[in-house]
Amino acid sequence: MGRISRTIFTLIVAGMVMASCGKSRDPQADGTAMQPKFGGTLIYVKNHPPATLDPALTTESESTIPCDNIFESLVQLKLGTTGTAPALARSWDISDNGITYTFHLRSGVKFHDGTPFNADAVLFNFNRQRDPKHPLHKNGDRYEYWKTLSMDKILKDIKKINDSTVQMTLFEPNATFLYILTMQFLAIASPTSLQKWDEEFSKHPSGTGPFRYVSMDNDGTLTLEANPDYWEGPPYLERVVFLANPDGTDRVKKLLKGEYDMIEMGGAEHFKDLHADPNIKLYQQPGVNIGYLAMNMSKKPFDKLNVRKAVVYAINREKLVDSVLGEMGRVAKNPIPPMLLGYNEEVRPTPYDPDLSRKLLADAGYPNGFKATLWTLPISREYMPDGKKAAALIQQDLKAVGIQTDIVTYPWNEYINRLYRGEHDMAIMGWIADIPDPDNFFFMLDKTVADHKQSNNIAFYRSEEMYQLIRKGKTTTSPLERSKIYKDACVLFNRDLPWFVIAHSVVTIPMQKYVMDFQPYASYARRFNKVWLNK
């Protein structure tokens, strides 16, 4: 059929949780556990070099994956579940009214530059984003996630109780707050290095994580080495080297030749070769992600609902998913993936109906169609392995109803920056969850986010009704009530259609058979402190 079925998708979810909750060591053929070995270098190949190694400035997974191994937050996601676990905070207390959080910090932890981790370090990192008077705040607009997640409206106050205790007070209860604390933009960096290097900190990053920064070459090759003093115990690997190779086909070829240890997956057409090679294994789990085509509602004619409907009905979604993602894509109908709270099973996906599309265009005043730009990704992503192919298929379907499009692309960092400024008419984009919560997807449809200079709301969708549902979803703590809120938000989304939703992908991470004990989280996070090489 070309798409992953609901049953298979559910089984993979269950399998992921069972695998992640089981023993951390890969079994030998005789069923006995293998003893991890210290040493060796893991070569992990991504699409693109990191845009930054300053956690407060990270916005995409090319940066957050290496940062996850250099820095840590107070709280982390728990492997194998959608829950949270202690990290730099060993525990925390929450007041009965859900407003005051008291974090008890780990003692004896040091940053890579030797600076002690303590309450002062936590306040320094939070305040450089929240306090305009902080010496490193400077241009507050650069702290994109702090602004996009409206942290100034969530966090009322943060104070030091003593060296090992920090208290945070919220304006009101927030069901997502602990999840937000797991995100990379709130990871804790060394105050000493931040003050020493200031805007050059990204070239000299210092955190508390399992790996320390060594170097980054002009071609984007990033080398990290094991932190022997890591509080959870030293990593097994001696080094992790991140290479950048935007060519998915070439990544697969070099993995099969043994030049790479792990890679970001290329297109679906490579599955057959990877499955057939006895030296390769594939880690797979349902991706907490969405791929979509956003329509810029701040530009005509996409301010008209009938035009957006016409675009949606013109595109053959099933053919698109089959062609671009194959068996590892599930057709989307909501803006959130199926495993999240509030996914609305009752919503019917919009059908492929070019005749209705033409009628809607005529009703909107465009009987002969119109011209627009169609932007697409320059690199493969978890949610869209081949943006150029997807754009060509969408272009063909739109042309059939009279919508003429010019396909546009830019280098990855420029592509993101231009999208966030709203230069596009339509754009293929997507989202990989920072946290496994529906708010992490719906915030991109918040009207207040659309007003930012650099906006994740690339549809520039400004619905008061959606805004109220998003706000209610954040402040409601009952899971049953939150589920109802987000189901209603799914219905509203499908009424207003700011995006044409395409697919949710199954995350596939190919690696050599000798790479042991790798487990990703229910987000973009990839950490290598438990990984070892059996060779």
Image: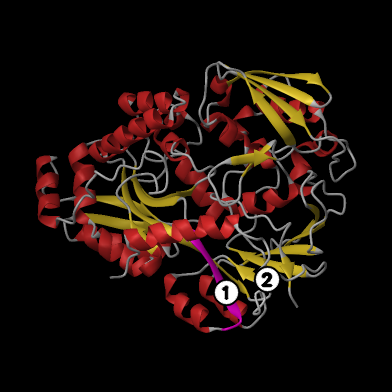
Who is closer to the viewer here, 444 or 238? Answer: 238
Asked if residue 293 is among those painted magenta in the image, a careful observer would answer no
At x 77% / y 24%, what residue is drawn? 165
The C terminus is located in which quarter?
bottom right
Left or right of 28 in this view: 390: left
Left or right of 25 in this view: 466: left
Question: From this viewpoint, is residue 137 visible?
Answer: no
The N terminus is located in which quarter?
bottom left
Using the image, determine if residue 493 lies above or below residue 290: above
Using the image, determine if residue 247 lies above or below residue 209: below
Q: Upstream in the sequence, badge 2 or badge 1?
A: 1
The disc placed on residue 281 is 1
Who is closer to the viewer here, 480 or 312? Answer: 480
The disc placed on residue 246 is none
At x 56% / y 29%, what residue is drawn? 177
**Coloring scheme used:** secondary structure
Residue type of the residue flagged with mark 1: Lys
Identify the image quadrant of residue 402: bottom left
Which residue does the numbered mark 2 point to in the structure image?
Answer: 515
Gap in angstroms between the C-alphas marked 2 and 1: 9 Å
* Residue at the outermost right position: 114
Q: Position of residue 65 (x, y in %)?
A: 64, 53
* Residue at the outermost front position: 31
Q: Secondary structure at mark 2?
A: strand
Q: Which residues are magenta?
A: 278-285
Asked if residue 280 is among those painted magenta in the image, a careful observer would answer yes
Number of marks in the image? 2
Circles 2 and 1: CB distance less than 8 Å? Answer: yes
At x 58% / y 57%, what residue is drawn? 20
